[in-house]
Amino acid sequence: MTTGLLDIESLHREDIETILTRSKDFQPAPGQTFKRFDILRGRTIVNLFFEASTRTRTSFEIAAKRLGADVISITASASSVSKGESLVDTLNTLGAMRPDAIVMRHSASGAPHFLSRYLPVPIVNAGDGTHEHPTQALLDALTIRDRRGKLEGLRVAIIGDIAHSRVARSNIFLLSKFGVHIVLCGPASLLPPQMGKIAPGVELTWEMEEAIRDVDVIMMLRVQLERQHEAPIGANEYFQFYGLRPEHIQLAKPDVIVMHPGPINRGREISSEVADSQRSAILNQVENGIAVRMAVLERVLIQ
Amino acid sequence: MSKLVIRNGRVIDPAQDLDRFCDVAIKDGIVREIGSEISSVGSEEFDASGLIVAPGFVDMHVHLREPGFEHAETIETGSRAAAAGGFTSICCMPNTQPVNDNATVTSYIRDRARRFAIVNVYPIGAITKNSSGEELSAIASMKQAGIVAISDDGRPVMNARLVRRAMEFARVLDLPLIEHCEDLHLSAGGDMHEGVTSTRLGLRGIPGCSEDVMVARDILLAEVTECRYHVAHISSRNSVEMVAFAKKRGVRVTAEATPHHFALSDCDVPPYDSNYKMKPPIRERSDMDAVTEGLANGAIDAIATDHAPHPGAEKMQEFERCPFGIIGLETAIGLALERLYHPGRVSLSNLIRLFTLNPAGIVSLDRGTLRPGAPADVTIFGLDHDWTYDVTNSPSKSRNTPFHGHEFRGGPVATIVAGQIVWRLNN
C-alpha cells in the first residue's frame, strides 16, 4: 500500500531516524553544489498547491528534479472550487493521469487525510491548514542535528502564534518523540492550554524571557497578520512582547541557534540583528529543506 | 374494522407502572385491552414472545428536510427511517426552505405527512421569522395549524430580549420553547469540540462554554417568564448540572440528549471523518459521562435523535466545509440498549420512559402510553438479538452516520402506528 506522508504524529521515531539519516546523503558537501540522482527517473510528481507558497513549492520541485523525477506544479488556489468542482473530483481527475505522487498544500486541516481515503496515489502533505507541515519539522530536526549534534535532551523554545501554526504542531510531535524539552510561548489567545497536552514534554509560558532562558534552540513563528484580531496586541506591541531581539539571546545557552520557517517579518517577530547573526540557522533550514524532501520523496515512491 | 392482538410479549408501560407478560388488543387504531389470553377471534395476531412491547417511541427532534431539501430527505423517507428505528411519532424542526414560520408552511407539512408519512409527524414552528433571530414568527396561528413547540434549531436566538418575548407568548400558548444552545460568537468557525483532540488535529473548536452560557441565560429567562423551556441535544457536563439545578428550583425546564452524545466522546472521532461532525459536537469523556448520568438520574428527560440527513456529496468534502449533522433514527434504540440498559445504568422501564412518556409530555401528545383508549402506537423491540447496521439499506435518503457497520445487541422488531404494522424486521 502506498501511504505517502500525511503527518508527523503517526510516524514512529525510527521512521524519522531513517528519513533524517537518508537526508544526510542528499546534503551537498560544503562548498559543493547539489548532485543530481537518477533514483526517480521516469516518475511523475504533481505539486498541487491550493494555497500560495513560494519556498515550499520550489523546494519540493527542486528536490524532485534532483532525484530525476518529472514535476508538474499547479497552483490551484480556489480556481477549481470556484468552478464548483469538489476537492475529491479535482484530485480524482489528477489521479486518473497516473502521477506517482501528489505533493499537496491546502488551507483545510486534514484535507490530505480526507483525500488519502479515496485516492490510490500517495500524498505528501506540504502543509494542511493549521494542522501539520511534516517536511518542515523534518528539515528543522536535520538542521538542529547538524548544528547541535543531537536532539535528545535539548531544550527548544517555540515562540509566536502556536494555536494556528502547522509548523509548531509538526515540530512538537517530532521533537517530543526524541525526548526534547519543548517550551511554547505566545500571547494567551494564541497559546491555548490544551497545546501542552498534545504530546509529552511540552511546557507553556506566556513570558518571552522565561521561554528563552537556557534553551538550545529558539524557533520563531511567523506572525500571521490575518490572525491579529484574535489577540489584543497590535503588530507593533507584538514585537515589544514577543519579538526576538539581541538581548534575548543572552538568556539562552551560549551556542543557541535561532530558527524560523520563513518568510520572516523583520521587526515584527524577529529583529534584523538576530536574523542575520551567527546564531541564525534560517538559511541552513532552507538548504536542508531540499535534502529532506528528497529523502521523503524517495521513501514515498520507492517502497 | 381491523383488529390486532399482540401476544405473549413483556408489556412495559411506565405511564401505567406496568411491566408484565400479557397480550395487547387493538381495534380501530385504539388500544382496547391489556390482559391475559385475550381472544383473537377475527383478529390478526403478532407473536411477541421474547420481545418487549412498549408504547410507540416519540422522537421530538428530527429534520425531515421537506419542503426545500428533498434531495436529502422527504417526509416520506424520513418517516420510513423512523418506523425502521421503532419510532411511531416524530417532531420535525422548522429549518426547511421555506422555514416553517407561518401557518401555511405548517399546514403544508401536515398535509404532506397525512398523505405520505407512515408514522405520526408533528411540526415544530420557528421562533423567529425565517429563523433569522430578528422578529417573532406567527406563533399563535402556527399553534392553530398544529405545531407542538417552537424552536430556531440550528440558528439559536442570540438576542435575549427576543427570547424573553418568545417565552412570554409560548407560556400563554402552552408551547415549549426548544433552544439549540450555542453562543454563536463563542463557537464561531468551530468544527469540533474544543479540546485536546481539536488542538492536535488543528481544527477550530466549539467550546463547551458556548453551550453553557446559552443554557444559563435561557434558564434564567424561563424562570422569569414561567415558560416551559426545553434544552435540545444537551451535551456538556455544566449544562446538565445547570438543568438539574434549575429543576430543583422549580423552573419548568426539560432536556433531551441524543444517542451520539451518550455513545461517543471526541477521542472516538476518526481524524477528519465528517460522519462525526455535528452540533453540538461530540464532547469529552466527562461530558459524555454527565449526559449518561443525567439520563439515569432524571436530569435529562428524553432521548431524541437530531436525525439530520445530508446527501453524500455534501459530506464528502474537506472537514471544515462539511455541513453539521448525522442521521440517527435507526440506531437510537440499539445505542440506548448498548450504553444505558445493558451496562445496568438505566432500567428498562426508565429507558422506555425516555423514549415515550417524557417526550410525549413535553410536546403535549396524547401518546406515549398503552392505556386502553389511547392511540394504538406500539414499539416492539428485542433485547438480545445481534444485528449490524448497514446504512446502505436505510430508507433514509442520506447515509451520513458514524454507526455504519456497528454491531448491536437488541433493537427494533416491529413498529405499529394506529394499529397498523408499518415496519417489521427483515420485511
Image (spheres, helix red, strand yellow):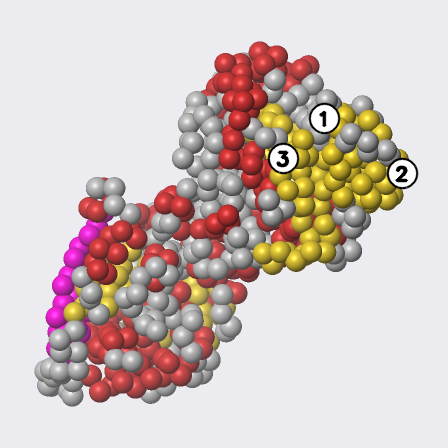
Q: Is residue B35 left or right of residue A78?
A: right
| Magenta stretch encompasses residue A11 | no
Residues rendered magenta in the picture: A56-78
In percent of width and height, residue A276 lies at 20, 70
Q: Earlier in the sequence, mark 1 or mark 2?
A: 1
Identified at 30% across, 53% down, the residue is A88
Crowding around mark 1 (Cα neighbors within 10 Å: few <14, some 14 to 19, many 20+) is: few
Of residue A154 and residue B237, the one placed in the foreground of this image is B237
Mark 1 or mark 2, whichever is nearer to me: 1
In percent of width and height, residue A22 lies at 27, 85
User: Seen from this angle, which residue lies furthest front?
Assistant: B42
Relative height, residue B89 to residue B19 (above, below) = above
Q: Is any part of residue B226 visible from this angle?
A: no
Q: Mark 2 = which residue?
A: B36
Tag 1–tag 2 contact (CB < 8 Å): no
Identified at 64% across, 19% down, the residue is B170
Secondary structure found at label 2: loop
- CA–CA distance in space, label 3 to label 1: 14 Å
**As shown in the figure, which amino acid type bears the numbered disc 2?**
Ser
Relative height, residue B328 to residue B201 (above, below) = above
Q: Mark 3 = which residue?
A: B422
Q: Mark 1 = which residue?
A: B2
Quadrant in which residue A135 is drawn:
bottom left
Q: Is any part of residue A121 visible from this angle?
A: yes
Secondary structure found at label 1: loop
- CA–CA distance in space, label 2 to label 3: 25 Å
Counting the numbered discs, the total is 3
Q: In which quadrant will I find the C terminus of chain A?
A: bottom left
Crowding around mark 2 (Cα neighbors within 10 Å: few <14, some 14 to 19, many 20+) is: few
Chain at numbered mark 3: B
